[in-house]
Amino acid sequence: MRLQAANAERDSALRRARPGLKLGACLSLVVLVACLPTNRAPWALLVLPLLFALARLAEVPIGSLARRWLWAQPFLLGLACLSYWRPHGLELAGAILVKSSVSVLSLSLLVETTSLPALLSVLRRIGLPAVFCDTLALLDRYWLVLAEESRRMQRARSGRLLGQGRWSLWQLLANSLGLLFVRSVARAERVQAAMRARGAP
């Protein structure tokens, strides 16, 4: 929520652009990069200067884009490794990794410069099922609740376990994942009940 507030304070031509235009440009770029032949995959790297220039224009912190990109890397590396055993596997894995990384970076820039409600409104207008859009909205809402509950549990755990070893902390973290999910769902339900009591849809 702090990130959303910080983004709201920034203003640029890219942030003021129509969400449908930004979404269309981003998806067109992703499709164009995906359609590059395997031996031409390094050409996708030519898009990076444009993406970084747009990020600077929109005053998007490079560190924020880098964090989103790094979060996706384990999945992208796993996908690339699956292609390693095919014919010309090394070249194919490298192409998948390059094209996926550029696509993730462009989508991260879209997310940083466009609010989720605006994106969902565009997706509804172009005919995506309402169930899909509502699921995305709920995932975003539950993610914020999950992150806040995780921070609260971490502070409580740190206050009770001074001087514990790293292995013990990992064991406690594994045991608390189920509790974190239950507490997050319960809190989200309380928030939803409060919103309905105030007349929210």
Image (spheres, rainbow, N blue to C red):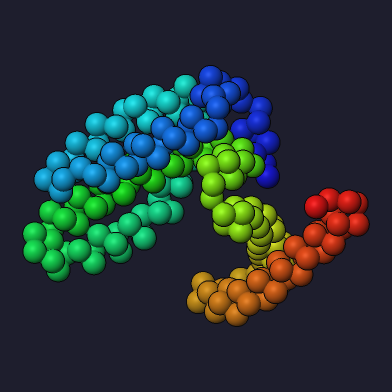
Out of 110 and 27, give the one closest to the viewer.
Answer: 27
> In the figure, 46 relative to 150: above or below?
above
Q: Image check: 100 left or right of 114?
A: left
Q: Position of residue 100 (x, y in %)?
A: 31, 49
Q: Residue at the location (68% across, 36% down)?
A: 5
Which residue reaches farthest left?
88
The quarter holding residue 119 reads: top right
Q: Image check: 134 left or right of 112?
A: right
Q: Position of residue 200 (x, y in %)?
A: 83, 50
Count of labels in the image: 0
Q: Image check: 27 left or right of 80?
A: right
> In the figure, 151 relative to 172: above or below?
above
The quarter holding residue 169 reads: bottom right
Asked if one can make out residue 34 in the rendered structure from this viewpoint, the answer is yes
Asked if one can make out residue 161 in the rendered structure from this viewpoint, the answer is no
> In the figure, 168 relative to 52: above or below?
below
Q: Position of residue 171 (x, y in %)?
A: 55, 79
Which residue reaches farthest top?
13
Q: Position of residue 106 (x, y in %)?
A: 40, 38
Q: Residue at the location (59% across, 45% down)?
A: 124
Q: Residue at the location (85% across, 62% down)?
A: 193
Out of 20 and 159, give the one closest to the viewer.
Answer: 20
User: Which image quarter holds the N terminus?
Assistant: top right
Which residue reaches farthest right?
197
Out of 188 and 200, give the one closest to the viewer.
Answer: 200
Out of 12 and 127, give the one closest to the viewer.
Answer: 127
Q: Residue at the location (14% across, 68% down)?
A: 85
